[in-house]
Image (spheres, rainbow, N blue to C red):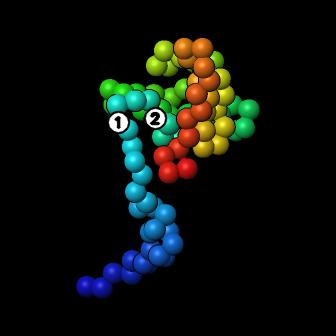
Amino acid sequence: MATNTPETPENVATEATQTAQLSLSRLMLIGTSGPDQQMSALVRLSGGRIVKVAAGDRVDGGKVQFVAPSRMALARRGRIEILTLPGG
């Protein structure tokens, strides 16, 4: 029995399988979504739990300053940290 499964274009397969160095022992941004003025982010905590945050939320000892496409800012320990998506 033949199937009509379309092949994945090479450029799509390459983008979907890029290797990124991930540090599983620290806070990591894994996604952003939503309309520009109300964006939220998915972050992976060092223990592995994934939480959804938005500007003003507290996470990992800091306060989320903003969420934008592919990045977010976190204020903690008197500094602003910019987290970006892996490979971005």
Label 1: few (<14), some or many (≥20) within 10 Å? few
Mark count: 2
Q: Residue 10 placed where, x, y %?
A: 47, 76
Extreme-left residue of the structure: 1
Taking the image as shown, residue 75 lies to the left or right of residue 42, namely right
Could you tell whether 27 is left or right of 24 in the image?
A: right
Q: Describe the element under mark 2 as helix, strand or loop.
A: strand
Percent across and percent down for residue 70 are 60, 43
> In this image, 15 relative to 64: left or right?
left
Say which residue appears at 33% left-offset and 81% top-offset. 3
Q: Quadrant of the N terminus?
A: bottom left
Q: Position of residue 34 (x, y in %)?
A: 64, 38
Q: Secondary structure at mark 1?
A: loop
> Residue 39 bears which disc, if any?
none
- Residue 85's place in the image compared with 37, above or below, is below
Q: Amino acid at mark 2?
A: Met
The answer to whether 31 appears left or right of 46 in the picture is right
Question: Which residue is at a point 54% across and 14% down the rendered structure image?
Answer: 77
Residue 28's tag is 2
Does residue 12 show up?
yes
Which numbered marker is on residue 24?
Answer: 1
Q: Give amino acid for label 1.
A: Leu
User: How many residues crowd mark 2 within 10 Å: few (<14), some (14–19), many (20+)?
Assistant: many
* Residue nearer the viewer, 72 or 81: 81
Q: Are marks 1 and 2 in contact (CB under 8 Å)?
A: yes
Taking 32 as reference, is 18 above or below it?
Answer: below
The residue under the point 58% across, 28% down is 81
